[in-house]
Image (cartoon, grey):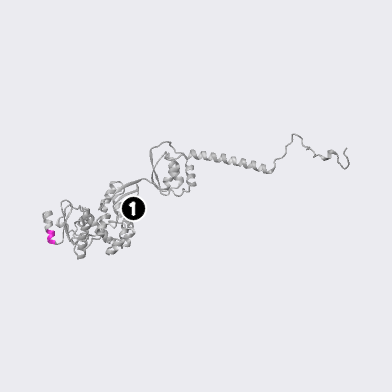
Amino acid sequence: MTGGRGQPAGLCQRSRSTRSPGSTRAAPPWRRVRLWACASVAVVVIAAGGVAAWGATQLAPMAPSPSAVVEVDIPPGAGTAVIADLLHGRGLIRNPRAFRLLARWRHLDAGLQVGEYALSADMTPRAILDRLAHGQVITVSFTVPEGYTVRRLASLLAERGLADPAAFLAVAKDISFLPPSAFAAGGPAADAMFPLEGYLFPDTYVVPRRAGPEGIARAMTARFEQVITPYAARMAELKFTLPQVLTLASIIEKEARVPAERAVISAVFHNRLKRGMALEACPTVKYALDIADDVPPVALTYAELDFDSPYNTYRNPGLPPGPICNPGEAAIHAALYPDSVDYLFFVAKPDGSHAFSRTYAEHLAQVRRWQGR
């Protein structure tokens, strides 16, 4: 018994739990949510791992080591599904669906380009996709020397298997293939045999193997445009049109065998044009015979010098209707920057160089000296 106002001892103690020893308390809601979240993440991770494993397998190269090149032609209008089936059929990819999904994931399914491709089974689908997306088609190279005519160029392309000669000549007559600068200058003369003559710039080109005559012509006129643009101010200074410059340059290209003589030969023609004299350039006669389907001789006869053609500068004053070949930049530069000399005549020497004269009497003496006439 306690003294005074004290309470019984049992009432002062905390009541003991009445749960039986084997009973459990229910998990709180937040703990159940966490358990579900962990389970969901685990499922996602497992699923992602499965997809990654599938993708790694299906997007692996068909061959583990370098293998033979397979040429594949992607036709115009082919979508990703057609391309995937084509690649699968050629043994280049494992799974067309995986290839389509990869293209879609990389936003390339609408950007695969047509053409001929060199692929191999050791390439990954990603590498193949990159090549198709960038249009890295099979290419060929060819070199066009300075002074080639359209007809000779057609033969060169035919020899290389790049274009049918008749098809290329047809393109050379189509003014729609001319560069913009040609139209800005008024276009070719109405009686020009091949409007593209002079605009097919001589150079080395790398083009798709099946570019065809149209693609080749566009590549060559585009290159011409790059070369001629810096000379626009000089043409305006001389009051020469682009067709006039190219025509004069083409004659210089054919006449000059020694590079150092280009500007001197240019001066002779400039001087004769200013005086109203006929140019009397033998290469123009040879060109006239060539486009008339005659075989131009090495040495022209007097009868051939009288051949009736607007290109014959022995019969017609001034420049011919258009270029007689496709001149290089050196000849174009010479046409625009002639030497400051007063020569009016020149005659070829046996070594390909020329003897220049101021008067006709001097010229006749040089002809007797060098050609025995």
- Total labels: the figure holds 1
Q: Which residues are magenta?
A: 360-364
Asked if residue 361 is among those painted magenta in the image, a careful observer would answer yes
Please determine whether, in this image, residue 275 is positioned above or below residue 29.
Answer: below
- Residue under the point 53% across and 40% down: 51
Please determine whether, in this image, residue 193 is positioned above or below residue 156.
Answer: below
Given the current orientation, which residue lies at the most extreme front position?
3
Q: Where's residue 370, x and y in %?
A: 13, 54
The N terminus, quarter of image: top right
Residue type of the residue flagged with mark 1 = Ala
Asked if residue 91 is among those painted magenta in the image, a careful observer would answer no
Residue where numbered disc 1 is placed: 219
The one of 77 and 182 positioned closer to us in this rendering: 182
Taking 233 as reference, is 298 left or right? left
The one of 78 and 55 positioned closer to us in this rendering: 55
Q: Where's residue 351, x and y in %?
A: 17, 51
Main SS class of the magenta portion in the image: helix
